[in-house]
Image: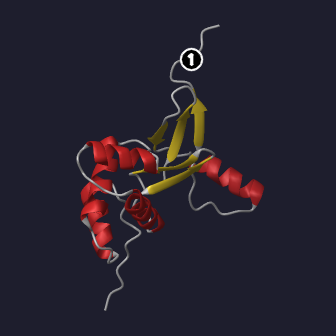
């Protein structure tokens, strides 16, 4: 019997996220589907409260507890991303390795895929003695630069 590898295929769509739930044996409840659909439609990082509010505004009734429990289950299984911030957790739809641009003036977090040059990675490995297997970079900047 072949062992199935589920961590190799990145989740790049709502369909991929739903498929990963099924592969992991997670029940795809109505509430869980609502949350995944919202994260893929919004395409931004949202707090649990924002997710709760938006779903209820859309007429998709879901309780606070259900939102938090489903977000925890989905993020702990690597189906969605959870970012810890000083003002709370934010959830996003990209769960594979990527970097972030933190927009200081709008407080948004944008997802970007950055690939460092191989020689830079090797140089860092030589300097630290650590073999790099993955990385994520946080950039900070202003969408509307202040004029001096």
Residue with the most extreme bottom position: 1
Q: Which residue is mark 1?
A: 145
Where residue 77 appears, as percent x and y from the top left, is: 44, 68
User: Which residue is at a point 43% across and 67% down the rendered structure image?
Assistant: 73
Residue 91 x, y percent position in the rendering: 45, 51
Instruction: Give the vertical position of 6 relative to 141 (above or below).
Output: below
Q: Closer to the camera, 120 or 98? A: 98
Apparent side of residue 31 relative to residue 148 in the rendered image (left or right): left
Query: Is residue 49 positioned above or below 141 on the image?
Result: below
Image position of 47 (left or right of 142): left
Residue 35 in the image: x percent, y percent? Answer: 32, 55
Q: Position of residue 16 (x, y in %)?
A: 28, 61
* Residue appearing at x 52%, y 46% in the figure: 99
Location of the C terminus (image quadrant): top right
Between 108 and 23, the residue placed more toward the observer is 108
Rendered-image quadrant of the N terminus: bottom left
Q: Nearer the viewer, residue 7 or 107?
A: 107
Q: Dot 1, crowdedness within 10 Å: few (<14), some or many (≥20)?
A: few
């Amino acid at each position: 019997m072949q062992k199935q590898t589920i961590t190799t295929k990145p989740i790049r769509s709502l369909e991929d996220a739903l498929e990963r739930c099924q592969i992991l044996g997670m029940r795809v409840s109505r509430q869980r589907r609502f949350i995944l659909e919202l994260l893929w439609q919004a395409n931004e990082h949202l707090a649990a409260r924002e997710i709760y509010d938006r779903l209820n505004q859309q007429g998709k009734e879901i309780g606070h507890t259900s939102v938090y429990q489903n977000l925890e289950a989905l993020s702990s299984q690597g189906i969605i991303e959870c970012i810890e911030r000083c003002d709370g957790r934010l959830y996003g739809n990209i769960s594979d390795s990527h970097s972030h641009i933190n927009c200081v003036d709008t407080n948004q977090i944008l997802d970007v895929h950055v690939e460092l040059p191989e020689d830079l990675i090797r140089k860092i490995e030589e300097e630290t003695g650590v073999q790099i297997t993955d990385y994520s970079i946080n950039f900070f900047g202003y969408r509307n630069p202040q004029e001096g």
